[in-house]
Image (tube, rainbow, N blue to C red):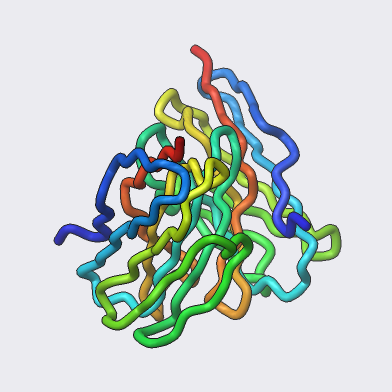
Amino acid sequence: DQQVKQNSPSLSVQEGRISILNCDYTNSMFDYFLWYKKYPAEGPTFLISISSIKDKNEDGRFTVFLNKSAKHLSLHIVPSQPGDSAVYFCAASVSASKIIFGSGTRLSIRP
Amino acid sequence: NAGVTQTPKFRILKIGQSMTLQCTQDMNHNYMYWYRQDPGMGLKLIYYSVGAGITDKGEVPNGYNVSRSTTEDFPLRLELAAPSQTSVYFCASRGAGGNTGELFFGEGSRLTVL
């Protein structure tokens, strides 16, 4: 029973364009949603989060949108840069303690 | 400030052996977590702890044990290793305040069971 789903295993985007990564969830009790970035042979690093009571949060080139009625969130990266090539994980927290991750989307930024 | 430190970084075990993956953090974080990442897959939560003396099961706890006797340390014990436990293990921690859910990860421990 996968509570956090990332249905696109990979995505290729041209440098300078927008990258949109998607995530779906099933548990209405999630109170925070987060995005992490992971390079090979390193631990994931935190990118951006959003509370379940909000619908948008921005931090520089990164914006996360939350659609609670659809149980869907997305991460927008504008403009995409070569250093953004990595695996991106969506995650969700329950009662601010248990944190569940999705399966990840590999983003490749092409020149 | 070392952050989250995991040891060992690499280990090969034979089927049936036991071992402990060590994790320590120096940020005085209350919450600590163990995840595993299988090849091409996402992170699965094994166990987590909300403070010293308190632990709880995650999504895939079978075959593992944890303890949290101090704030700093959260070791993961593998009993009777099986090939299905071949994975990369990540320890993470976070503080009680700030961006809820912002985890700080270690560099990972790659375990192979043959």
Residue A30 location, x and y as percent?
68, 71
Instruction: Residue at 40%, 32% (x, y): give it.
Output: A40
Residue A15 higher or lower than A19, as above or below: above
Residue B10 location, x and y as percent?
30, 40
Image quadrant in which you'd find residue B102: bottom left
Residue B71 higher or lower than B59, as above or below: below
A76 with respect to A29 (left or right): left
Taking depth in this image into account, of A10 and B11 the one nearest to the observer is B11
Taking depth in this image into account, of B105 and B86 the one nearest to the observer is B86
Residue B107 location, x and y as percent?
32, 46
Image quadrant in which you'd find residue B4: bottom left
**For the view shown, which residue lies furthest in the top direction?**
A111
Taking depth in this image into account, of A28 and A47 the one nearest to the observer is A28
- Give the total number of marks visible in the rendering: 0
Instruction: Residue at 57%, 18% (x, y): give it.
Output: A14
Instruction: Residue at 47%, 56% (x, y): give it.
Output: B80
